Every structure is written in C-alpha cells, then in structure tokens.
Image (spheres, rainbow, N blue to C red):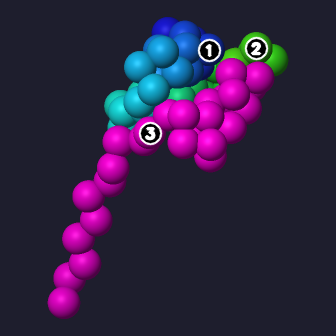
Amino acid sequence: MSIRLIVESALQRAYLTREQESQINHLLWQQLYSELDLDAIDQLTLALLEGQVQAEPRIVSYAA
C-alpha cells in the first residue's frame, strides 16, 4: 500500500490509527515513496494540525 492511499483512508475517516502511522513511517524509512506520497503527507499534517483528522491516542505510562 502506498503512503498516498493510507493518507486518503485517514482523511476519509478523519482518523489516523497507530497502525497507519506505523505503515507510513515504515515506507518512509525504506524510502518507498513518491512525490505524490510526500504531498499526501503534507495534506495529512495540515489536517491533523487543523483538527480535521484525529490521531489515535498513545498510551504512555511513567514508572514512579
């Protein structure tokens, strides 16, 4: 699956899962992306910043 398709799914659902985020990170790390994928990441970032898309919360625990 391409980054662009992952982003399109997140934008349609207005929700980014941790799994989708992990897939995007993996594809970036492996350098498996195109210019269109980078444009899609820009769209997703803007949507997250503007609150149009919500990211799945991370559970953080701190040891005392």
**Seen in the image, is 16 located left or right of residue 46?**
left
Residue nearer the viewer, 54 or 2: 54
Confirm whether the magenta stretch covers residue 46.
yes
x and y percentages locating residue 17 in the rendered image: 37, 33
Q: What amino acid is at disc 2?
A: Leu
Q: Say whether disc 1 or disc 2 marks the residue closer to the N-terminus.
A: 1
Of helix, strand and loop, which one carries label 2?
helix
Dot placed on the residue nearer the N-terminal end, 3 or 2: 2
How far apart in space, not on screen, are marks 3 and 1 (Cα)?
Answer: 18 Å
Please report the residue visible at 68 percent of the width from the left and 38 percent of the height from the top. Answer: 46
Badge 3 amino acid: Gln
Please tell me whether mark 1 sits on a helix, a strand or a loop.
helix
Residue 56 against residue 4 in the figure, above or below? below
* Residue 42 belongs to magenta span: yes
Give x and y (percent) for residue 39: 76, 23
Label 1 CA crowd tier, 10 Å (few <14, some 14–19, many 20+):
many
Q: Give the range drawn in magenta.
A: 38-64
Q: Look at the numbered discs 3 and 1 and tell me whether their residues touch, using CB distance below 8 Å.
A: no
Q: Is residue 63 left or right of 15 when viewed as pictured?
A: left
Mark 3 and mark 2 residues within 8 Å of each other at the beta carbon = no
Query: In the image, which disc is placed on residue 4?
Result: 1
Q: Would you name the residue on which mark 2 appears?
A: 36
